[in-house]
Amino acid sequence: MSEETTSGKWTDKKNNVLLASAGLLTIGLIAGGYFMGDGLLRAKMADRSVTVRGLAERDVTADLATWTIAYSAQSSSLADAQIDIDGDTKAIGKFFTELGFKADALKPTGANVNQYDSNGIPQYTIRQRLSLRTDDIDKAQAAVARQFDLVRRGVVLEDGSGMSYTFTKLEKIKPEMVAEATKDARKSAEQFAKDSETNVGGIKSATQGYFSIESRDGDGGGYGVSDTPYKKVRVVTTVDFYLD
């Protein structure tokens, strides 16, 4: 076989190998582009989501009542002012005993004495504070309703006197309320998905808002009534749902 023939065959073989390699490379690029494009599409689909808020509200009744009673007595004699304030303290104690509270239900929380001159005559004012703390909400409301009886007994109630009601069992209802808020959020997401002709998937992320406890019907209002035992607990959650 001549050298020219051998060289030609080698050249043809080399060209065939190059063509085959180029073909494989082309197929690889096409396949790679397809899978890359498909991967990007799937990634884009996975990133589709909607962020909505869910609300949960619940009416509750306070389980703790605290009444701060501020009162005072005034006289040109410190001893007389002290006698008057002691008399008021006894009158307040009797008032609550008549309503069925125990003798130790009232606790002293502070006292002070002010002295000033009026036309050269010294004047003394003694101020005291007592605090009532009870879980008997009905009895506490009855006391507030009859508080003017203290005035009739000569007790001078000052600003700062008032009943406040507290709901202390929030931790017991938190899980249920968070679940309710999440369900409410899903309803909003499903409506959005329906309008967008998609479906709601799982939760991508969620943020629980803070719980608020407010008077259900606004402040109680009126003298000595700073609050109401009827509360509304509220929480808002923000949920990010995947869309299929």
Image (cartoon, grey):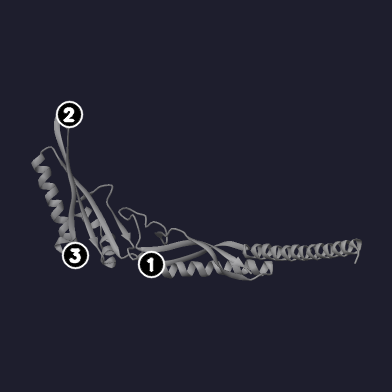
Amino acid under label 3? Phe
Q: Earlier in the sequence, mark 2 or mark 3?
A: 3
Q: Bin the neighbour count of mark 2 within 10 Å (Cα to Cα): few under 14, some 14-19, many 20 and up.
A: few
Lateral position of residue 60 relative to residue 243, left or right: left
- Residue furthest to the left in view is 79
Which secondary structure lies at badge 2?
A: loop
State the image quarter where residue 136 is shown: bottom left
Q: Looking at the picture, how far across and down is residue 222, in whole percent?
A: 35, 54
Q: Is residue 126 visible?
A: no
Q: Earlier in the sequence, mark 2 or mark 1?
A: 1
Q: Looking at the picture, how far across and down is residue 196, in whole percent?
A: 68, 66
Q: Is residue 123 visible?
A: yes
Where does the N terminus fall, quadrant-wise? Answer: bottom right
Q: Earlier in the sequence, mark 1 or mark 3?
A: 1
* Residue under pointer 1: 60
Kindly report which numbered mark, 2 or 1, lies closer to the viewer in this rendering.
1
For the point 41% across and 68% down, which residue is it?
A: 175
Q: Nearest the camera: 86 or 132?
A: 132
* Residue under pointer 3: 101
Mark pair 2, 3: CA separation: 44 Å
* Residue under pointer 2: 119
